Image (cartoon, rainbow, N blue to C red):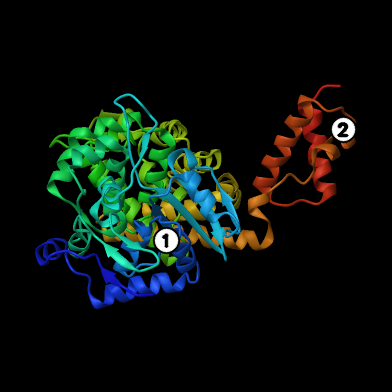
Amino acid sequence: MPYTELPGDDTARHETGRSTDAQRSALSSLIDSMQPVPDELGERFAAHDQQLALVGGPVRDALLGRVSHDVDLTTDAVPQRILELVDGWADSVWTVGIDFGTVGLRKKGLQLEITTYRSESYSPKSRKPEVAYGTDISDDLLRRDFTVNAMAVHLPDGTFVDPFGGLRDLKTQVLRTPGRPEDSFSDDPLRIMRAVRFAAQLGFTLAPEVAEAARNMADRLSIVSAERVRDELVKLLLSPDPRKGIELMVDLGIAPYVLPEVPGLRLEIDEHHRHKDVYEHSLTVLDQAMELERSRGHEPDLVLRLAALLHDVGKPKTRSFEGNNRVTFHHHEVVGASMSRKRLNKLRFSKDVVNAVSKLVSLHLRFHGYGKGEWTDSAVRRYARDAGDQLERLHILTRADCTTRNKRKANALARSYDDIERRIDALAEQEELDRIRPDLDGNEIQEILGIAPGPAVGKAYRYMLELRLENGPMSREEATAELRTWAGQHLQD
């Protein structure tokens, strides 16, 4: 693929930056890796006097030496014209985003999205952007969120386009908007969340004017749909440095419109009531959970990271001051589980994510009753059974929740948790702890007691489950005898 930079005078090139040989090679390699699709499609558009360019994230990531899984293209052709140009060439086409100027297609295993040059903006009270089509790529790049995403490569000739200094900002690792940040954030307030997400994802800093605009316009996030905000939050939490993104959200006043419970963790500390800074503690737990996540061979885990961040959100509501300068947070895990569930539901997280996170928050203190191993086997069984399919995450969260600087105390807690994990593993070899059931099922209970389906069967089932947790597996004869004894004391007729 031939590669050239956009013609221009030396001054313009100096201001926007020149690509290095390595960067030019990276862009060429990116396009070559997708061949023959880029050349075929580019030539198809050029033959009909339409422009086509690879744009945004794929270009940025190639210049950074990162792998991108997106293939985003932009064109001066309107959506209906795009459909005409790919008809008979694409293996499949979809038009889910056509109202926003985007046509999706698949060719030779590649999934591409082609979007008409456009500008989009929100009216002051609207939750949906208004889309207008354009005819010039520079105008299209001007409406992009950040300069590092406002670079393009024309197809099929490979001309590189960087009118707003994206290369310069990549080099200095700064997030800057192509135009005024106030205009950019007004056009699409979600870009405020994208700014902190990219900071966490790429390790960049926000230009001072971008940070100031984000702070002043954070309330505009209230008009953006919960689903779009949620998706940015997910990307932030799964980034290499979610702590950086969360801190920016709090410092810039963005968090109250996304996760208001998090800045609420910043409880004041005075000389009479000393206690941990719950906000800093929660961020440290998040960091430590990620370290354990990696060391135990897991991929980035959204549920675990949400639970780590939110595990103590119930503390502000349950804080009380007692004698001897003690601060207590009785039942904060119960309150926190409820608060987490409510917040995640408002952000439209899936039921599975909401249930898993709230369960972990509710259980995160359970281990602290373990002491030096005084739990009976039945207590260990209950711990594993109550955690269910969240047991491994609970292991990580509980270990991460130890942020004490007292090495002796930290080591003692680690040894105790090592012990409970060993005991769970040992019992799991004998029993299927994650699927513990009574030794008699509902049908067998009805048959043995000669009763019909109803509340009595449920009571008997729960009793047999408690017995199973307490004593471990029993033979059918032993279970039957226990059931008859219980029924004689608790069931009439």
Disc 1 vs disc 2: which is toward the camera?
A: 1
SS state under label 2: helix
User: Would you place residue 445 above or below residue 371 in this image?
Assistant: above
The residue at 68%/57% (across/down) is: 431
Left/right placement of residue 221 relative to residue 12 reads right
Label 2 Cα crowd, 10 Å radius (few <14 / some 14-19 / many 20+): some
Query: In x, y percent, where is residue 430?
Result: 68, 61
Label 1 Cα crowd, 10 Å radius (few <14 / some 14-19 / many 20+): some
User: Would you place residue 2 above or below residue 221 in this image?
Assistant: below
Mark on residue 221? none
Q: Quadrant of residue 205 in the image?
A: bottom left
Q: What amino acid is labelled 2 in the image?
A: Leu
Left/right placement of residue 217 relative to residue 379 reads left
Query: In x, y percent, where is residue 73?
Result: 41, 56
Q: What amino acid is labelled 1 in the image?
A: Ala
User: Would you place residue 371 above or below residue 342 in this image?
Assistant: below
Mark on residue 449? 2
Front residue of 225 and 265: 225
Sooner in the amino-acid sequence: mark 1 or mark 2:
1
Left/right placement of residue 185 relative to residue 386 reads left
Query: In x, y percent, where is residue 449?
Result: 87, 33
The residue at 28%/65% (across/down) is: 160
Quadrant containing the C terminus in the rendered view? top right
What residue occupies the far left of the structure in this picture? 11
Quadrant containing the N terminus in the rendered view? bottom left
Tell me whether the residue at label 1 lies in contact with that at label 2, contact meaning CB atoms closer than 8 angstroms: no
Q: Quadrant of residue 426 in the image?
A: bottom right
SS state under label 1: helix
Front residue of 50 and 295: 50
Query: In x, y percent, where is residue 414?
Result: 39, 60
Mark on residue 46? 1
Does residue 41 appear in the picture of this structure? yes
